[in-house]
Amino acid sequence: MIRTIEVLFVIIIISGAFIAVSFFTVLPPPSQVSPINLRRLSFTTLQTLDSSYDLSKAAFTDDDPVLWGNLQVALSASLPPNVIYNLTVYDVNSADGQVYNFSKSMSNAQSLGITNDASTYAVASSNVSFNFTPEKIGAQGNGGTLYILNCSDANGWWITGYTAQSLAQDLYNQLSPYFVNTVMVQNTSQLGQILNGTPLQGENVQNAVVINTYGEAVPIPSAYCKAPYSTDSYACYSYYLGQRVNLYNWTWSSIVGYPFYYVSNTATFSGAQNSWGIYGMQMTGQGGSRGFLEGLNNQAYASNTNAITDSASRQVTLTQNVAGLCNYYGIYPSTYQTATRALSNSTLAGYNLKVGLNIFNPSGDYLAGAIYNHYAAGSSNISGSLLALGLTRTPDVRVTGLSLLSYYQPRLYASEYTAEGTSRVVILQLGLLGSG
Amino acid sequence: MASAALDHMISLIIFMAAIMIFIGLFSNTMQTGLAYERHNALSTKTSDLLDTILLNPGLPDNWGQSDTSVVGLGLQDPDFNQYKLSSSACMRLASSTQTPIYYPRTASYYSNVTGGFGGYMLASNAKCLNSSTASKLLGINGTYGFQLTLSPTITVSITKISSGQPAQFTVSAVGTGYPLANAPFSYSLVQVKQDANSIPSYTVTNGVGVVDSIGSAQLSFPINGENQVYALIVYTYLDGLKGIGYYLQNPQSSTKNVVPLIDSFQNRNVTLVHSDSVGQPSASPSYSLLSYNASFVILTEEYTLRQVALDQPSAFGSVYNSGSGQNFSSITLPDSDGILIVTCKGTAGQYGLVLMSWGLGSLAFPLTFGGNPAGQEWVTTDLRQVTIGGIAYQAKLELWNLAYTGSG
């Protein structure tokens, strides 16, 4: 009898556990499981409203009920009926010590439910023309080209939540003023052209900066999806990339994670996946980075799958030098970042690499972010560089932009500009009805 | 001893039963959790895929203006950035909801995109991109199904509210969530001259107005609304939102018309054929002649129509539906978005008028491209505001996982 009672006690305990687990594992409502991306909807709505500069006009004319009435009508008309909004305009003005000062707001609901998101959009007064003249990187020498990989026929990895295209667009907006030419490489075929030294828009291929927006994956042209590039799961393609970086003295920028871990071409690898369910991609593995470094060092290719990073999670901080330049360039990523693919400094030393700039303070032997310069033995000239940001996903491309600007340090020639209240920030917050 | 054994057995049975029940219960909770993770990942994929389609111009980047096969799918206008889509690239997407039109002379099918009676955008299926190819280009073939819908944000509808003369119309401008209250609009009345000339010409009357607080306005013209052949095209605009709508009147007695078929995006070739020669099975082969006058108009910044000369002999002529003679005619359009206006006249004096949109946004045609989400286990949706040829559109992507097809 006692055992039966014990079992009943066990059942009561398990029941209690089940009830407790059920209590804490309440699933969210469907609108939160598969929500509309309200942030992008909000941003594209603001862009549409400002396509004829009407939003800018209204933002600078708080006291014109007609303009604001039209804006409210257009906003209501452009959003689906189940989307509620709150549009707020802030004056950007540091005169009284507060940068953002509330200017005007309008909304069609008292609250925005539990599912809401917002985006910001900066508008400038039509009465003012900003005169911001940055020094062009490479303008005094042979270079000055920024290539941003924006290939339509490749998939990214470890850029979850973003697309390579949206990252490319952000980087373009952030960095193009600082380069003589900024070229969006729209497909892998164009990537193949620049690898062969052929300019796409008459730009200078030599000494360019190449930003790979695909995270741990690298786009590969179809023409390279064969031997010898396919050797060792395409580690030889990475080797070839390293050789090209050396030849053209490029600065190759890896924005997140383990560099050269996958290759991607959605047409050629349409039936292949990276072992995580992303099709159009093939895993190269740890040999990719080794291949790249061998190519960069202009040495013979030898298969080497030893890791150049470890997987330890490290909390790292921006170096004082880089943190100080945040204000100069107006780019403010978080000072604290998490790295899970920090590169081993001692390993990299075997490839004639020297640290040109530490982005983050070292964590023992590991560097979470640095620009490595390659010097051929006995030479004092740089022959190719690698910016490796071994941060964990998802990427913050502001770190990439700040790293490159901190390395090249282009000067800013700002015009004397004292007018107040000539910039405004519009924030459109959207929520879904019935989401609560 | 027997009591202890019985107690042992009973307790064991109860315990095993309880364990089985709890395994079932926990399994249910875990499955629900896994389903949540799966659906959440699908939502992220939807957003990613939509940006991939909208934020790159594809390969080649001018594929909307070529007849070559597409290597990379993207709809962004290569001359702009952000969410401005290429009108011509959108034209090359084969509609998945409207039935294709068959043209027996060339044994070809044409993708059918239209915004209503008398408005055409029939593009050769052989030159269009189908959803199967698009899936492969997007790298989701066999893993995800998708449906991309491009719908005009502002619906401009025109309704005739009178009979006889004068012809009166109600114009309504409504957004996806609210009427476009107090929005200004401009209109163009394209009126076919019904005179003795064998080749019919037309006149254009322009005007402006403002819709009221419910997005409605009335227009009146001193013409006979039933006997006359005309088209009323209305543009409305407010704070960056631009919409367009049209109303087309052909006499009920006239059953013959000219049908424009897009045969080349690269050369901008449009084949004009007799309406009786289109369809399957082919319509009556009886002799019929239509004299036509083709012209091209673009929308100016002042929201009026400006005619662009089609300096080619085939801009005027006639088409037959017979075994002999000229049963089709080919014209080349200018290198810009606009509207092809074709007026025609039959041997018995019947008149006709058709509009063809060159560029998806020129007449604000909606387009649905891709598979059918009906019956899928879980379909996620994402939405962006875009512009196509200056007209405000909403791009909606529906995505589902093919590995979990069926109700579940």
Image (cartoon, helix red, strand yellow):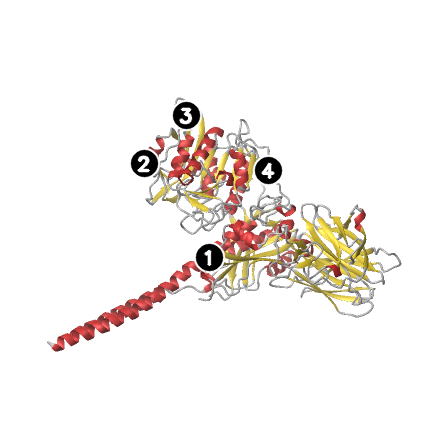
The alpha-carbon separation of the residues under discs 2 and 1 comes to 39 Å
Name the chain letter of the residue that bears numbered label 2.
A
Marks 2/1 same chain: no
> Would you say A309 lies left or right of A281 here?
left
Q: For numbered disc 4, what is the local secondary structure? A: loop
SS at mark 1? helix
Q: Nearer the viewer, residue B184 or B376?
A: B376
Task: Classify mark 3: helix, strand or loop.
Answer: loop
The Cα–Cα distance between marks 1 and 4, rounded to whole angstroms, is: 44 Å
Numbered disc in front, either 1 or 4: 1
Which is closer to the viewer, label 3 or label 4?
3
Q: Is residue B171 above or below residue B335?
A: below
Looking at the rendering, in which quadrant would you find the N terminus of chain A? bottom left
The residue that label 1 is drawn on is B42
Percent x, y of residue A264: 47, 44
Which dot marks residue A131?
4
Chain at tag 4: A
Q: For mark 2, what is the residue?
A: A365
Q: Are marks 2 and 4 in contact (CB under 8 Å)?
A: no
Q: Which callout, 3 or 4, points at the residue further toward the start of the chain?
A: 4
Task: Check chain identity for marks 2 and 4: say if they share one.
Answer: yes
Discs 3, 4 touching: Cβ within 8 Å: no
**Sequence-first tag of 3 and 2:** 2
Q: What label sits on residue A376 in the rendered view?
A: 3
The 10 Å Cα crowd at callout 1, few under 14, some 14 to 19, many 20 or more, is many
Amino acid type at mark 1 = Leu
Q: Which residue occupies the extreme bottom position in the image?
A: B3
Q: Chain of mark 3?
A: A
